[in-house]
Image (spheres, rainbow, N blue to C red):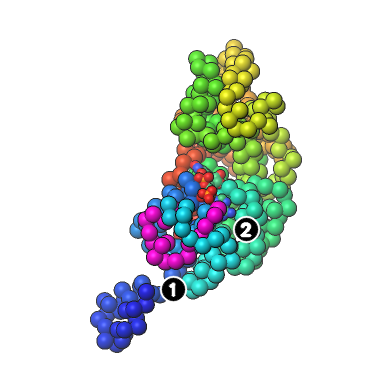
Amino acid sequence: MSAVLDTVPVGAASAATVSRTFAAEAAPTIAVVLLGTGVVGGALLKLFNTPAAASLRLVGAANSRRQQTDPTNLASRSLREQLNHQGDARDNAGLLAALDASGAAIRVIVDATASAPLASRHAEWLARGYHVVTANKALAGGELPGWRALQAALASGGRYGDSATVGAGLPVLSTLRRLRTCGDSLLTLEGVFSGSLSWLFNQYDGSRPFSVLLREARQLGYTEPDPRSDLSGEDVARKLLIIARNAGFSLGTDEVDVQGLVPEPLRALDAESFLARLEELDAPLAKLHAEAKSRGCVLRFLARLNQRGRARVGLVEVPLTHPAARLYGTDNQFALTTTRYNTQPLVIQGPGAGPEVTAQALLGDVLALG
Ligand SMILES: NC(=O)c1ccc[n+]([C@@H]2O[C@H](COP(=O)([O-])OP(=O)(O)OC[C@H]3O[C@@H](n4cnc5c(N)ncnc54)[C@H](OP(=O)(O)O)[C@@H]3O)[C@@H](O)[C@H]2O)c1
C-alpha cells in the first residue's frame, strides 16, 4: 500500500504526484466501521462508493458472524457477499483497533443492525471517544436506564447520530432538537410511525380481507418476514419513546400503552403457523372497519403522546378530515404541537421506510461529524 511513498523520494516527485500520494496515504478525516450488512447496511455500502462519501474511509465491516478489516477486501464491491463466507470471527475489539489504527480525527461506529446486545455498547463506545451513528433503536427506544446511560456518555463529547431511528431519516428528531434549542417545547405528538402499518390501513377499505393485504405487504417487503414484529406495535412504541425522550419526557417502556393487532392465541406460535392462520385477523378488523365507516371515519394505527406525557400506540378511528386519513403508500406522519406551533401542528410527512433513504440518513449523520 505504501510502495509509492517508500520508493519515491518526496523531493523528486512532481507536485501532482505528491499531492495524489499524500491524498491516498494520509490519515482520513473520518474513519468508519459498519456493523450490519443487511438491507440497510448493504445500501450504505453502495453510498460509500459514491463521491458524496469521498471524505470517509471504511476501515471495518461486520455481519453477525464475520468481520473484515483488510483494506483490499473492504474496497471490494462484493464485500457484503464476501462476509457470508470469508473474514475474521466477530470481535468488536478488532474493529475498534482498526478505527484507532486509522489515525483519523473522527472515528465512527455505524450500527445498521437491530441487535440489542450491540446497542447496549453504544454508551461505552461514546465514553471511549468514538462517535456512534445508528439505525438500531434498541438503546434510545429501550429501557430507561439505557437511555440515561446514553445521555451520560454524550456528556463526554461523543456524538450520537440517530436520524435513521425514526421515520427512516425524515427530519423529525433534528427538527425537534432545533425547536428545543430555540426554547420551544413539545406539547403533543401524534402520527403514523410505521411504513408497513401505514400501507396496510391506507389500503384497507373493506373490499379485501385484511389477511390478503397483509400477505401482499409481506411479498412487497413492506413487513418483516414475521409480520407480528410490525403488527405488535412494539417498533412504533420504540419510535414514540425515542421522540418523547428527545422532547424531554423521560418515559419508561412500561409507560407506553401498546394495543397491538396480534390476538393473544396467535402470539406464541412459530412464524410458519402464524402465517397459516392470518385469516383469524379478518373478522375483528372487518367489524372495526365497518363501525368506523358508519361514523364517517377510517382506521389508522396511531402513536400519540399527550401533554401529560401519556403515550399510547394502537388502532383508532379518525375522521376523513384528520391529517392521517390522507396518507399514501408507506408514508409516515409526525404531527408536532409545540408552544409556538400551537394553533396548527407542524407536520412532517413522507416515506418512512426503505433502505436507500435509511442509508442516506446514516451517511448524513456521519458526514455531519466532519
Ligand atoms: N429496512 C428499513 O427500511 C429500515 C428503516 C429504518 C430503520 N431500519 C433499522 O435498521 C436496522 C437494520 O435493518 P435491516 O432491514 O438492514 O435488517 P437486516 O436486513 O436484517 O440486517 C441486519 C444486519 O445486522 C447484522 N447483525 C446482527 N447482529 C450483528 C452483530 N452482533 N454484529 C454485526 N452485525 C450484526 C446481520 O448479520 P447476518 O447477516 O449475519 O444476520 C445483518 O447483516 C434495524 O434496526 C431496523 O429497524 C430499517
Q: Which residue is mark 2?
A: 122
Q: Label 2 CB, ligand 1: below 8 Å? A: no
Q: Tag 1's secondary structure? A: loop
| Identity of the residue drawn at 43% across and 55% down | 82
Q: Residues within 10 Å of mark 2 (few under 14, many from 20)?
A: many
Q: Tag 2's secondary structure? A: helix
Looking at the rendering, which quadrant does residue 345 occupy? top right
Image coordinates of residue 171 in percent, x first then y, are: 51, 46
From what the image shows, is residue 147 above or below residue 353?
A: below
In reply to whether residue 79 is colored magenta, the answer given is: yes
Image coordinates of residue 23 in percent, x first then y, are: 35, 73
Image coordinates of residue 179 in percent, x first then y, are: 58, 49
In the current view of this chain or complex, which residue is farthest to the left?
A: 14
Q: Which residue is mark 1?
A: 27
Region of the chain picked out in magenta, as a range: 64-80
From what the image shows, is residue 199 above or below residue 152?
A: above
Q: Label 1 CB, ligand 1: below 8 Å? A: no
Marks 1 and 2, the one that precedes in the sequence: 1
| Identity of the residue drawn at 55% across and 21% down | 210
Q: Is residue 55 left or right of residue 189?
A: left
| Quarter of the rendering occupied by the N terminus | bottom left
Which amino acid type corresponds to the residue marked 2 in the rendered image? His
From what the image shows, is residue 104 above or below residue 314?
A: below
Q: Is residue 45 left or right of residue 317?
A: left
In reply to whether residue 36 is colored magenta, the answer given is: no
Which amino acid type corresponds to the residue marked 1 in the rendered image? Ala
